[in-house]
Image (spheres, rainbow, N blue to C red):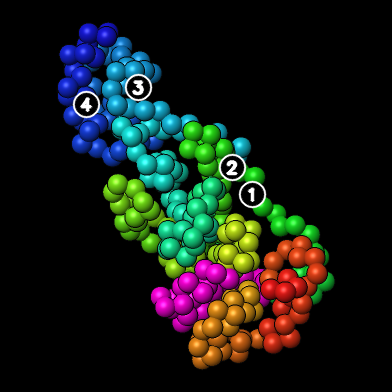
Amino acid sequence: MASRFQIAKPDIVKAFAEGPRVLRTHDVAEIFNKQRDFWRLTKSTSLTSFTRFMTEKTDLKPVRLAFPQREVSGYTWGEVPLLETLLGLVENSYYSHYTAVRIHGLTEQLPKTIYLSREKSSSSVLGRERPEPYDQKAIAAAFSGPPRASKNEVELTQEQVRVVLLEGAYQGGLGVTTGEVHLGSERGLHLRYTGLERTLIDIAVRPFYSGGVFEVAKAFENARDRLSVNTMAAMLKRMAFGYPYHQVVGYYLERAGYKASLVELFHRQPMERDFYLTHAMGKTSFSSRWRLHVPEGF
């Protein structure tokens, strides 16, 4: 069998070299099933023996990510940057939160955690009405303790990073974009990630995925010359949260020195509940203007 593979190897390598650099298991199976006759492989040749030959004798490299909720596995053709590999293996995924903050150049930090998100299916919103605002007691109870942070993560010791795979509410890809990103690598990386406005909404909502409230505040400051506040206001309304996050976003905008007319887009919205900048803050101050509890001295 090995000789059959060896004879066909130049054609096999050519087929893979001309295809995507990140492949899921079904991608390899599809190439194998389409090309096996052209490669003159015998009918008894199995996909298992084919992939074994490929990983031993060619540039096809197996990748396995043992996330607690579901293992993600596949292959790369040659060396592929981690950020491109993850996107290729996790279907319909995009970078978010602190990773998107770094992509947009809003932090001087080099986060050791990668946040990769994907949305729940559209069926999860069928028949769902716009959520009613939570009552005051429920809000206070929810934010008095630590947040419910995802445990769906894996440590990559060789790369010295942690990858957290988040699953968010279906938003139809709202505010998600694709582009070439330069993060100090030899070439630009082709990535899918949240755009600037969506990124700032996400980190205001989940600061514990973004380095904390001080990093969030810094990101708002650094985005001041690029951010479309009008776009962000419209986007936040479309996302239809049950919590009054417009109070949080408005507070960050005002703190970062945005124009009063832009801050007013959020301040003129109804403020019917006292809210919290983040969870488990300990001692707090209260902004009566935004009806918002914030860390003392923030």
The residue wearing badge 3 is 55
Q: Is residue 35 above or below residue 176?
A: above
User: Secondary structure of the magenta portion, mostly?
Assistant: helix
Dot placed on the residue nearer the N-terminal end, 4 or 2: 4
Q: Give the residues in magenta.
A: 217-244
Q: Which residue is mark 1?
A: 150
What residue type is disc 3 on?
Thr
Q: Counting residues from the N terminus, which is met first, the one under dot 3 or under dot 2?
A: 3
Mark pair 4, 3: CA separation: 12 Å
Which residue corresponds to mark 4?
13
Q: CA distance from mark 3 to mark 2?
A: 26 Å
Image location of residue 193, percent across then percent down: 42, 58
Earlier along the polypeptide chain: callout 4 or callout 3? 4
Q: Determine whether 266 is above or below 154 in the image.
A: below
| Mark 3 surroundings within 10 Å by alpha-carbon count, few (fewer than 14), some (14 through 19), many (20 or more) | some
Mark pair 1, 4: CA separation? 40 Å
Report, in whole angstroms, how far the alpha carbon at label 1 lies from the one at label 3: 33 Å
Residue 142 vs residue 78, the one in the foreground? 78
Amino acid type of the residue that numbered disc 1 sits on in the rendered structure: Ser
When asked about the image quadrant of residue 206, the answer is bottom right
Q: Looking at the picture, which amino acid does disc 2 mark? A: Glu
Q: Rounded to the nearest whole Å, what is the CA distance between mark 4 and mark 2?
A: 34 Å
User: Can residue 193 be spotted in the picture?
Assistant: yes
Q: Is residue 298 above or below residue 86?
A: below
